[in-house]
Structures are given as C-alpha cells and as structure tokens.
Amino acid sequence: MKNILPAVLILAIVGTPAVADEVKLQSGAVLRGIVKEDPAQPKKLRIEVGVGTVWVDRAEVLSIEEGRTPLHEYDERFAKIRDSVNAKDFLDLAEWCRENGITRSVKGLMEKALRFDAENETARRSLGYEKHQGKWLKGEELYAAKGLVNFEGRWVTVAERELVIQRRLEARERAETAR
C-alpha cells in the first residue's frame, strides 16, 4: 500500500477542485473526492475521484471533511437523464465530464448515446470508430477492411509484409553463400 500511495495521491489531487470531501491521512497527505462507504470493505475507505477510485486503510485516516466536487454534480446530472432515450442527453453529459475531468464516465455515456443513435458520429469517433466504405468499424475489423494484415504484432500492408519476408530470405541466402 505504501508503495502505490504516492501515485494514487497524485491521481486523487490533480484536477480536483478545492471544494470536495477532504480526507486527511496520518502521512500528512490530503485526498479530495467523494467518500463512499462500502460494507464489503469495512476496514477500507473508498474515495471516488475524476479518474477512478482510491482505496485507503481506515487506520490511516485522521479526518474527513465533507464538501462538494464535480462528481457530486455528475451524479445529479446523470440522475436527471438516467432514463432518457435521447442520445444528445448522454453526449452533452459526456462533454461536461471531459470539461470537468471525470474521464472515467465518458466511454459509458458515449456507449449509451449509441444505443439511441447508432450512427452518431461524435460518439462513434470518441469510441475509436472510423467510417470505412459506409460502415463504422474499429480495431482489427477496421484494419482488415483497409487491407492490412497483422504481421508480427503490427498492422501492415500485404506489400510491406512481403517485402520484409523477401529481405529476410535474401539475407539468409547471402549468409549461407558466405559460409
């Protein structure tokens, strides 16, 4: 725990406004986020920050001062649109999340937007899709559609693969001739 604590503290503090639940630790460090109780982890304290979740041993906690963060506002905004069937509601909230450093929520909101508007370009591009010959594709499917092949862990053209293979064969032949 002590080895990862400095990195976790940086993640918890960076980009977090001064008004938040403030957790003071015995080490002198201060974490800001939303403190949540987890009955399954009674000896741990769970703190939600914009980029994820931080867990701290309760024995290390000196004090907790309640405050307000963009995460609180996110929860309120999401509660208002939770049952919406309008893709724009989720796109708008995703943009708000980006602007307020709540990056962990963006992907889920974009996926939810696609449920209601499967052709939405903003959501598709945010999730890594690219339109190729009229179809939204991503990852291996996109590379294959572009005519690329996976060769030794990289996506290359067939010509590039053949060139590498040819050069290797020529190098072997030269090496054998030299012997």
Image: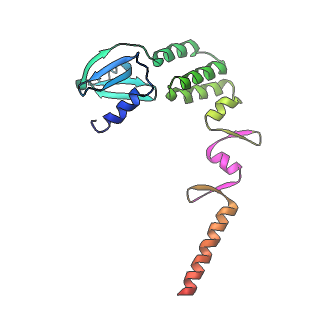
Q: What residue do we see at 40% from left, 18% from top?
A: 18
Is residue 99 visible in the rendered image? The answer is yes
Q: What residue do we see at 35% from left, 30% from top?
A: 9
Vertical side of 120 occupied by 65: above or below = above
Residue 170 image position (x, y, % from top left) = 62, 77
Residue 129 image position (x, y, % from top left) = 65, 38
| Colour approach in the figure | rainbow
Vertical side of 153 occupied by 70: above or below = above
Please name whichever residue, 70 or 165, is drawn nearer the observer in this view of the structure. Answer: 70
Vertical side of 138 occupied by 66: above or below = above
Residue 165 image position (x, y, % from top left) = 62, 69
Q: Is residue 51 left or right of residue 178?
A: left
Identify the magenta region. 135-151
Which quarter of the figure has residue 119?
top right
Q: What residue do we see at 55% from left, 56% from top?
A: 153
Residue 76 image position (x, y, % from top left) = 51, 13
Is residue 42 visible in the rendered image? The answer is no
Q: Is residue 103 left or right of residue 46?
A: right
Q: Is residue 128 left or right of residue 59?
A: right
- Looking at this view, name the residue that lies furthest to the right: 133
Q: What residue do we see at 34% from left, 24% from top?
A: 31
Instruction: Tell whether position 20 is magenta.
Output: no
